[in-house]
Amino acid sequence: MSSLQLLTLHNVANVPQLHRGTAVGKLTDVQLRAWLKAGKPIAGKSDGDGLTFTLSANGVAAWVLRYRIAGKQRELTLARYPDLGITDARKLAAAKRVEVQQAIDVAAVKQRQKDELKQAGTVAELTELWLDHSIRPKHKHPKVTERVIERDIVPALGRKAPKDVTRPEVTRLLAKIKASGRPTIANDVLRYLRSIFSYGEVLGMVDKNPADGIKLDHAGGKEEARTRALSQAEIVRLFKAMHEAGTSFSRDNELAVKLLLTLGCRKMELFASRWAEYDLDAGLWRIPASRSKIGESRELPLPAPVIVWLNELKVRACGSDYVFPARRTSRRFEHVSPDTLNVALNALGHGLEAFTVHDLRRTARSLMADIGVDFDVAEKIIGHKLPGTAAIYDRGNSLERQRKALERLAALIVKLDTGNSDEKIV
């Protein structure tokens, strides 16, 4: 969600409901998830009082408020779905309708705010314009890019005028990021800065792109595919370090590690998940297409230990919609920050060779190979598309085969948690 949308949403909870359709709309989350899964473009499905759900041809779902002012039909894009849930979308639409009833053209106001950003002219404001133009309308996961910009680009260059940024400044920033042990992020930042300043040239905010001429060798260098996976003995040591850390390594973090090792899912598939996606009675997690790297929803069976861990997390969530709610007030996320677990693991002092949260996913895949899980089942579990014609014949008992494989993997993780890495699980 952009900063403009966040500002708009700030006091929305206190807005009076002026129409009956605002409180209880026509649409449901079940419908919205089904439409996302189907992937067919939707020009508009009305929730009532002008609030409309849309789905573009490239799979971007959004809330749009349609209204009339001075006899003209107008539209205001509120935010993406599911970034903005159906309840909050209704509240935001109600707030905007209040403004419309006061003869305020809310779409025109938003455009004026964008125009003011162009005139104000800082790098932070240019990045916001670039995100709105090049990333948010076209990418299914814009928060990946937003997170890098907010963490690495804005703190270093955000207050400067784009015209004042020099090539040596950009080079020093890239070197600093690489020195922090993040060469891949350094390369990402270089690519983003090239595009951001190129867009600044189009807008007249930049005379010459300061990122031009800087090669990957000056940033993070050639990227090698990671192969790091933890051995069973290393997992035992990791669990021991987590237990001995006490409150300095939270129970939420410990359960997150166990879930990632057992389910093999991507970090943000788990951290941004909502309780509505889980059927704990049936032992099933429905991962929506909006958080899937391959753009397809999938169902993942939940083995018994995972259900126990999730029930504990449900108590710890204190009524939040999210499995891992943000523990601190944040404008960026209602769920835990994407960086939280990496930071906690780096501070743990486990004494192991360096690894990232994503390496836990690779570890889960390696463990499945260790216990003899069939290739097609393991690939299905971790959300990879099956090669060639294998996907065509992936029918029938696929879910049951995944369930049996995950029960075996969960049994192994439980044994490793007790310090036993010698017993063979077959």
Image (cartoon, rainbow, N blue to C red):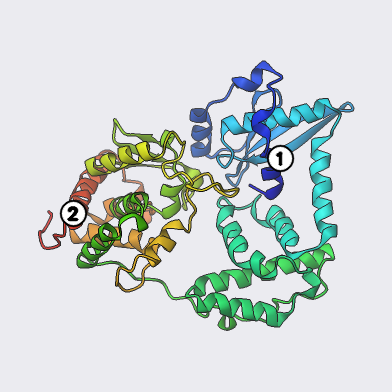
Q: Answer yes or no: is residue 44 visible.
A: no
Quick one: label 2, few (<14), some, or many (20+) residues within 10 Å?
A: many
Q: Quadrant of the C terminus?
A: bottom left
- Total numbered labels placed on residues in the image: 2
Q: Residue at x 81, y 70 (%)?
A: 206
Q: Which residue is mark 2?
A: 412
Q: Position of residue 195 (x, y in %)?
A: 69, 67
Q: Is residue 131 left or right of residue 177?
A: right
Task: Name which residue type carries label 2.
Answer: Leu
Looking at the image, tell me whether mark 1 or mark 2 is earlier in sequence order: 1
Task: Name which residue type carries label 1.
Answer: Thr
Whole-number angstrom distance, CA of label 1 to CA of label 2: 48 Å
Q: Residue at x 33, y 70 (%)?
A: 228
| Vertical placement of residue 354 versus 35, above or below | below
- Find out whether the residues at labels 1 and 2 contact each other: C-beta distance under 8 Å: no
Foreground pick, 93 / 317: 317
Q: Position of residue 53 (x, y in %)?
A: 63, 33
| Vertical placement of residue 57 versus 198, above or below | above
Q: Position of residue 62 (x, y in %)?
A: 63, 39
Secondary structure, mark 1, is helix
Residue 96 quadrant: top right
Quick one: label 1, few (<14), some, or many (20+) residues within 10 Å?
A: some
Q: Which mark is residue 76?
A: none
Q: Which residue is mark 1?
A: 8
Secondary structure, mark 2, is helix
| Vertical placement of residue 10 versus 423, above or below | above
Q: Is residue 93 left or right of residue 59?
A: right
Q: Residue at x 58, y 63 (%)?
A: 151
Q: Which residue, as the protein is rendered here, is positioned at the far front?
A: 247
Q: Is residue 325 left or right of residue 214?
A: left
